[in-house]
Image (tube, rainbow, N blue to C red):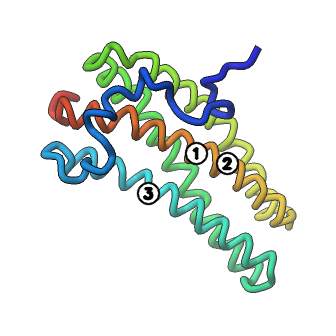
Amino acid sequence: MTDDLALDQRDGLPDALRVLLETYPRAGWNSHANFAGLVQFWLERHVMFRKLTSLLQEDAERAMDGKLDPEQQKARLSRFGGALVNDLHGHHQIEDHHYFPALSGMEPSLLKGFTILDKDHHAMDGLLDRFTKSANGVLQNGGEVGRFREELLSFDAMLDRHLVDEEDLIVPVILKHGADALH
């Protein structure tokens, strides 16, 4: 039996968990009074994760095409791949231990959504492990950059699915209640 809400199975959150998104649509987020500060910072972190995966993908493709020196690609992979892994782990820990419990307390009807996001983080641990092993294969063993790129594409798709769903659930809650309610 498959879990239709598992990260690798779903194409979005169920409508019942997106109810606040109707009241607080994405198009109005940055003009909302509660956007500045926490929401803006949090979304900037998500943008950074997306930029890092894009940069790593571009580097891998340039290396595969002979347009980026392999040693330069390895140095950039080490730097930006390490930042991606470390920052994602830290980001998820803060969410799991502080934000998700606090936010689900503000909106108990969305508890299932926070449970889904928490499960995503456990699934992401496996994805991050595969990403790290694939990157280390390139860095340490001269592994095939093409294989790393394929792993990165899979990783990026799952990461983006998680980030979009997380944004759709969390941002409206913070906009509704304000960041001060998290303390």
Tag 2: amino acid: Phe
* 9 left or right of 105 in image: right
Q: Name the disc covering residue 155, or none.
A: 2
Establish if 166 lies above or below 78.
Answer: above
Q: Separation of disc 3 and disc 2 at Cα?
A: 16 Å
Residue pictured at 57% horizontal, 64% vertical: 80
Q: Separation of disc 1 and disc 2 at Cα?
A: 6 Å
Q: Position of residue 139 (x, y in %)?
A: 76, 64
Instruction: Name the residue beneath numbered marker 3.
Output: 47
Instruction: Name the residue beneath numbered marker 1.
Output: 159
For the C terminus, which image quadrant? top left
Indicate the quadrant where residue 137 lies.
Answer: bottom right
Helix, strand or loop at mark 2? helix
Q: Position of residue 81 (x, y in %)?
A: 61, 59
Q: What crowding class fits label 3: few (fewer than 14 Cα within 10 Å), some (14-19), or many (20 or more)? A: few
Tag 3: amino acid: Val
Q: Position of residue 102 (x, y in %)?
A: 29, 23
Establish if 34 lies above or below 183.
Answer: below
